[in-house]
Amino acid sequence: MTGLADDIKLLIQVQDVDAQIQSLDAEIKKIPREMDIHYKSFKAKKDELAALESELVEIQKDRKLKEVELDSGSESINKYKTQQYSVKTNKEYTSLQHEIGEIHEKNSVLEDEILLFMEQADIAHENIEKKTDEIKLENEKIEREEQENKKKINRLEQELQKKKEDRKNLVATINDAFVSRYERIRDLKNGIGIVNISDGTCGGCNMELPPQVINNAKTVKGITVCERCSRILYVKESD
Ligand SMILES: [Zn+2]
């Protein structure tokens, strides 16, 4: 077992390693969260594509209906034209001619509408193509990122393992009770269990410390803790 002054120096190193472990851990956990954002945006694009495709189906359906109507109008015109050959009176002939004229007008409106649907279908086709390209690129990007992430996680986990090993070796040389005390405070105080005294104040909570406390920390006669935040206090050798 080493003396308290040595333990303090080692504990500061432990805290340093703990901070590295914490940041490696956070970095590893961040990766799937970031991927989730990509997956969500990818899914949104696929939903947009599905919406465009059903929009196109609707346009084609509407167009089909108008085409059926147009065909039936043309058939009627042919029928009336045939009837015109067999009518007996001028009046009957004119009445059929009138019917034919009305259907022509209707058909002309239908043709305009069909043309409009064709234009809309063209636009929908273009949008579908664009969206499909976007999705393909996004998919490639995600696959690339997944590959990179696999490597990155591997590397970070190896680093993390090494840091944990370092910590174990360090801790093995320090007084157990001292380590436990540090760990308790660290868990309660956001990862900081041991702080230095700078300008007479606690490096953790900034409280001004009584000279007696500062003196205790300087002489390292026993474990000195901050009365306010309970962190272990030490004085840097240069101070
Ligand atoms: Zn404090």
Image (cartoon, rainbow, N blue to C red):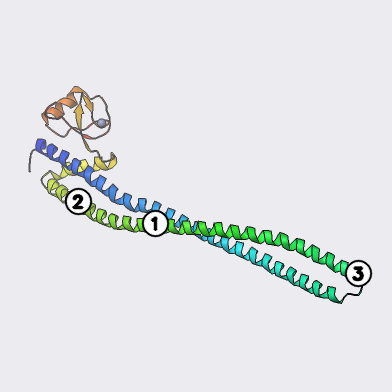
Q: Please state if 131 lies on the left or on the right of 18 as rendered.
A: right
What kind of element bears circle 1? helix
Q: Quadrant of residue 195?
A: top left
Q: In this figure, which residue is indicated by the disc labeled 3?
A: 90
Residue toward you, 36 or 45: 45
Give the residue type at disc 1. Answer: Leu
Distance CA(mark 3)–CA(mark 1): 70 Å
Give the residue type at disc 2. Answer: Glu
What kind of element bears circle 3? helix
Residue toward you, 217 or 118: 118
Distance CA(mark 2)–CA(mark 3): 101 Å
Distance CA(mark 2)–CA(mark 1): 33 Å
Relative to 117, residue 188 above or below: above
Residue occupying image coordinates x 43% and y 53%? 41
Q: Find ligand 1 in the image and state its quadrant.
A: top left
Q: Classify the position of the N terminus by image quarter.
A: top left
Residue occupying image coordinates x 18% and y 27%? 213
Q: Classify the position of the C terminus by image quarter.
A: top left
Q: In this figure, which residue is indicated by the disc labeled 1?
A: 137
Say few, some or many: other residues with alpha carbon within 10 Å of mark 2 (under 14 / 14 to 19 / 20 or more): some
Q: Disc 3 vs disc 1: Cβ atoms closer than 8 Å? A: no
Residue 190 at x, y percent in the picture: 29, 40
Residue 58 at x, y percent in the picture: 60, 62
Relative to 4, residue 74 above or below: below
Residue occupying image coordinates x 67% and y 59%? 113
Residue toward you, 64 or 217: 64
Residue occupying image coordinates x 73% and y 63%? 107
Give the residue type at disc 3. Answer: Asn
Q: In this figure, which residue is indicated by the disc labeled 2?
A: 159
Residue 232 at x, y percent in the picture: 20, 35
